[in-house]
Image (spheres, helix red, strand yellow):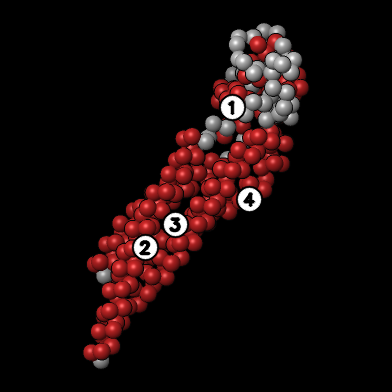
């Protein structure tokens, strides 16, 4: 009996240190997940107003929330491990499960949206650019379009001819421009009045925007699914420690 208890205690100590090591890595992983979410929202969200779906934004918010919960859960996991409280271990396991599901959802959303992005842009980007550019209440779209065309050296959705259908270009407010000034290779006031290839970019923005967003969806999906897989080991260690403590109790 004494030998059994000694082996059980030894196993419990090993599990405690394994779970503690996992919690340290888990806390850092939570920081990374939150950082990716914030990075997406703060630095990569300029073009969100050009997207018809809110899925891209939703995946970033899910990662931020998951990252915060992961960091809090990591602290709880350390307390549960060293205090050997089975009720805390149960709570820790449940939180791990919730985070696991959140990150799987973020990864799946990123993957699904990745597949749908091309269709969405083809159906909506031209209309968004031509109907909302320089229109009241759509300042975000105007700013996003100007940045998009300058950053990716493109003009219009499919090509520069798209701007012929623009409500702003057709109105008197355009000042004789045939394309926005942001289409110009060198931006100066009213440079959009001349649409010669030497003056403006002729290629469309749709493919470049699609590539840009897909790259970031791959990062979001990989981080979400990757951290979720790591959490499986945490849940296994937690179950083993819980069982070990139960055996010691008896």
Residue lying at 30% horizontally and 57% vertically, measured from the top left? 75
Q: Distance between the residues labelled 4 and 1?
A: 27 Å
Q: Which mark identifies residue 22? A: 2
Q: Which mark identifies residue 216? A: none
User: Which residue matches tag 4?
Assistant: 112
Q: Position of residue 182 (x, y in %)?
A: 62, 19
Q: Distance between the residues labelled 3 and 4?
A: 20 Å
> Is residue 72 shown to the viewer in this render?
yes
- Lateral position of residue 218 relative to residue 201, left or right: left
User: Which residue matches tag 3?
Assistant: 99
> Is residue 52 shown to the viewer in this render?
no
- Lateral position of residue 121 relative to residue 85, left or right: right
Location of residue 28 with respect to 55 vertically, above or below: below
Q: Mark 3 vs mark 1: which is more N-terminal? A: 3
User: Which residue matches tag 1?
Assistant: 151
The number of numbered badges drawn on the structure is: 4
Q: Mark 4 vs mark 1: which is more N-terminal? A: 4
Location of residue 196 with respect to 52 vertically, above or below: above
Label 1 SS: helix
């Amino acid at each position: 009996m004494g030998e059994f208890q000694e082996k059980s205690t030894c196993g419990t100590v090993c599990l405690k240190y394994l779970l503690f090591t996992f919690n340290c890595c888990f806390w850092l992983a939570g920081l990374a997940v939150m950082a990716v979410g914030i990075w997406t929202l703060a630095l990569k969200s300029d073009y969100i107003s050009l997207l018809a779906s809110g899925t891209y934004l939703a995946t970033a918010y899910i990662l931020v929330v998951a990252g915060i919960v992961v960091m809090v859960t990591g602290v709880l996991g350390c307390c549960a491990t060293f205090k050997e409280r089975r009720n805390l271990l149960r709570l820790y396991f449940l939180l791990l499960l919730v985070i696991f599901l959140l990150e799987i959802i973020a990864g799946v959303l990123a993957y699904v949206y990745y597949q749908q992005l091309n269709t969405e842009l083809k159906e909506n980007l031209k209309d968004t650019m031509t109907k909302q550019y320089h229109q009241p209440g759509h300042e975000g779209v105007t700013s996003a379009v100007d940045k998009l065309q300058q950053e990716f050296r493109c003009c219009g959705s499919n090509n520069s001819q798209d701007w012929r259908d623009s409500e702003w270009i057709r109105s008197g407010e355009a000042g004789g421009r045939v394309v926005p000034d942001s289409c110009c290779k060198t931006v100066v006031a009213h440079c959009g009045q001349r649409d010669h290839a030497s003056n403006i970019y002729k290629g469309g923005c749709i493919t470049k925007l699609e590539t840009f967003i897909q790259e970031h969806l791959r990062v979001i999906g990989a981080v979400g699914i990757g951290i979720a897989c790591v959490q499986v080991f945490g849940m296994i260690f937690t179950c083993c420690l819980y069982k070990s403590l139960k055996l010691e109790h008896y």
